Image (spheres, rainbow, N blue to C red):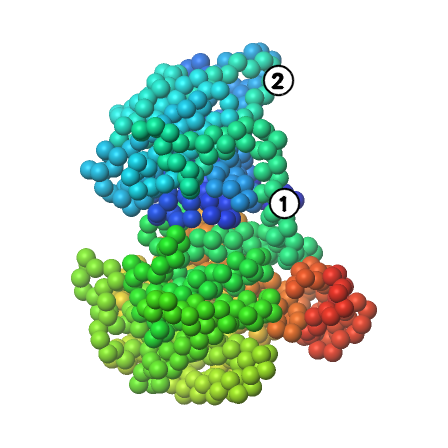
Amino acid sequence: MANYGHFDDAHREYVITRPDTPLPWLNYFGQDEFFGMATQTAGGYTFWKDAKLRRLTRYRYNNNPMDNDGRFLYVKQGKSVWNPGWKPTRTKLDAFECRHGLGYSRITGKKDGIEVEQLMFVPPGENLEVWKISVRNKTKKTQKLSLFSYVEFCSFEALNDMTNYQRTYSIGEVEIEGSAIYHKTEYRERRNHYTLFGCTRKIDGYDTSRDAFVGVHHGLHDPKAVMTGKCTNSRAYGWNPVGAQQINLTLKPGQEETFAIVLAYVEQGDLPKFDSPMVMNKTKGREILAKYSDLKVVEAAFDAVKARWESLLSIYQAPKVPNEHLQRMVNTWNQVQCMATFNLSRSASGYETGIGRGMGYRDSNQDILGFVHLLPARARQRILDIASTQLSDGTCFHQYQPLTKKGNADIGGGFNDDPLWLILSTCAYIRETGDLTILNEPCGYADKPGSKDTLLHHIETSIQYTLNNRGPHALPLIGHADWNDCLNLNCHSKEPNESFQTAGDIAGSKAESVMIAGLFLYATRDLVKLYNFMGQAQDASRIQAHYDDMLKTVEEQAWDGAWYTRAFDAQSNPVGSKSCEEGKIYIESQAWCVLGGAGQNNGRAKKALQAVDKYLYTPEHGCALQYPPYSTYHSELGEVSSYPPGYKENAGVFSHNNTWIHIGWTMFGEGEKALEYYLSICPSAKKDHDKYRSEPYVYAQMTASQFSPTPGEGKNSWLTGTGAWSFVVASQSILGVQPDYTGLRIDPCIPKKWKGFSVSRKFRGVTYSIEVTNPKSKSKGVKSLVVDGQKIAGNIIPLSTDGRTAVKVEVTLGA
Ligand code: BGC
Ligand code: NOJ
């Protein structure tokens, strides 16, 4: 088994030690409005706020060789040409290392005694990324070399940029001033912003035309200018503008040269647009470059990136967990992934092109569950933004563009689960913060411009929507699909040229979703607790009645004998039932019925989990989404049956829904099972990286299942709901530290052999140092809770009222 790297937990880094990983292994920079992505070979791109509408650099997906656009440095020394990140030249290096850290990546390559280090990050609050570059002569002789930088600019609107060459090849414009290249395509007309690509050191040449730098018949692996050792000082007029700078260095033995390159998105604001006709006012660009010409500023900006992460992570740290994988995921990488999914939803990753999908309604609501503890104020704003894309009848725009915050139907609509997720995110936010004022915030409905209906109004509308839209079994209508986008029971598509997601549905269908019923149970139970906390007992009992009613319906209509049926199709035939030839059992209805509290008193919940264990689970890969996979296409089921067996929704291991089962096991005190299942999809625990292929530090959306020809192959990493839900599993369900309305609830569910663990949790202004001991080798049940020396009844640490900001908590399991 090849070894591609290892975790450096002390520095919260993943260290990649060979560049040819099975797939590009990606990292993200930026947390505010400016984002960058880079792989271990410096592939990737950069954008401001919106990867579709404000993309600064280009990236060609689905390409071969893969991952061949990025932030490249080339070294030319004598005849030898190489990249510190190995690509695009792929010249063999004497040493290579890429450290993916939190918000930064540091690539170091060495050849013939020359070492080049490229540290990339986005300083907090800035709309730019910095590359700190160090070139070191590790030999005993003076060495001469040329270093070349390279990025390819995108003309901001990424879809047009990659499809409309008849226009884009004629619009490219740049300016060059000293060591700075200004990309200002469309600036003369409606844009009031530009991209700066500037070097803080004197340069010895530049290119801005790709044809000049790379060569029309060359590639990035042998760019003409680098091969000949000389930039041509080209100015791009149309075609493909790039930024390339040449720096000639003569380094004495042991000498090091350090400088920075800045890639910035600059909004002109009220400044005059032009200094003279065709000459852009560059005041802001010059200021940025001047600022980062001071290496102390660069250092301080990098320190600020690290300090910010340390401060965020200090909100939840579990330093003494008996399992190293859970420990590093919950303390570091899982939270990092939660930041990325919160910021980018499903828009831009190695698999999401940034032009396909924006901020998902159901996705972003779920992402909040793993993010809200980090920056509750941002979660608050997000909840309101999402709610504003709901329509007054309760339906929702399925996604919105981050730049405009306007909902759209580009990837379809009519997903009847969408409205309910808003309740989960809102309740999680209030449990974290105690801030009930969010409920009175006016968000309005997308179809009622100027309306000021409150968030609570949206929540009631959402409940009402499910209640109003029920089918023949009194179960919720599925609409176009529910959480499982591919369960298109009303679409009946027979036309290969249409997308399952946007093809539209037959009118008046009766197809129903048991998963939505379970989600409704979960959401209404959450809401009952919220109303009780608000002192609105009548509202609580009103919602409780809906819960009771739906629970009865689920138990009467959806129990299939050994598990819960998944759905009823447009003809009211069961889906996910023993009576089906294929797709007999689905995971989502087991998960949500159990999580919603069904099957508690009649043994069904446990049976449903056992059925998952029997038919769907393998310890190597986790749980497949359903069983048996569909071997043929069923138009009455839709996209789910379109995938080859064992992939994606057709019985692939869809990590996201596995996490709900993990929570299910903890509800039953099954600590061993919960951890075993947790580890089955945990990227850090994957051993054979040639097989798994995806990053070992973040979750992938999907792993090819036992039913596929390539079991164990991870795909579509980073932007998946698995991020948030896994953090919920590890932090709240297994380690059991749960924010609640009236305090911090402690309810761990751990393997019996764990002797204990500790968690430090900042909650509502207080740092709780929690020590859990397990003297009787139990999995669940708090025997005693001692808070600052005082024994407390029950398992909720009450909110401190006396101004204490540090509280010691001793928990003994074994009730
Ligand atoms: C995928 C789903 C995804 C959907 C988005 C489908 O092709 O299988 O996982 O959520 O597209 O529109
Ligand atoms: C990915 C989508 O982002 C998510 O919304 C959906 O629930 C899953 N696919 C399952 O189809």
Where residue 254 is drawn, which disc sits there?
2
The C terminus sits in image quarter: bottom right
Tell me what residue is drawn at x 28 percent, y 72 percent. Answer: 489
Name the residue nearer the viewer: 267 or 247: 267
Task: State left or right for residue 451 relative to residue 115.
Answer: left
Q: Dot 1 corresponds to which residue?
A: 307
Snapshot quadrant of residue 755 = bottom right
Q: Residue furthest right?
A: 789
Percent across and percent down for residue 661 are 50, 69
Question: What amino acid type is highlighted by mark number 2?
Answer: Gly
Q: Is residue 796 above or below residue 344?
A: below
| Res 655 quadrant in image | bottom left
Mark-to-mark CA distance, 2 and 1: 31 Å
Q: Residue at x 66, y 71 (%)?
A: 743
| Residue 108 on image: x %, y % | 53, 30
Amino acid carrying label 1: it is Ala
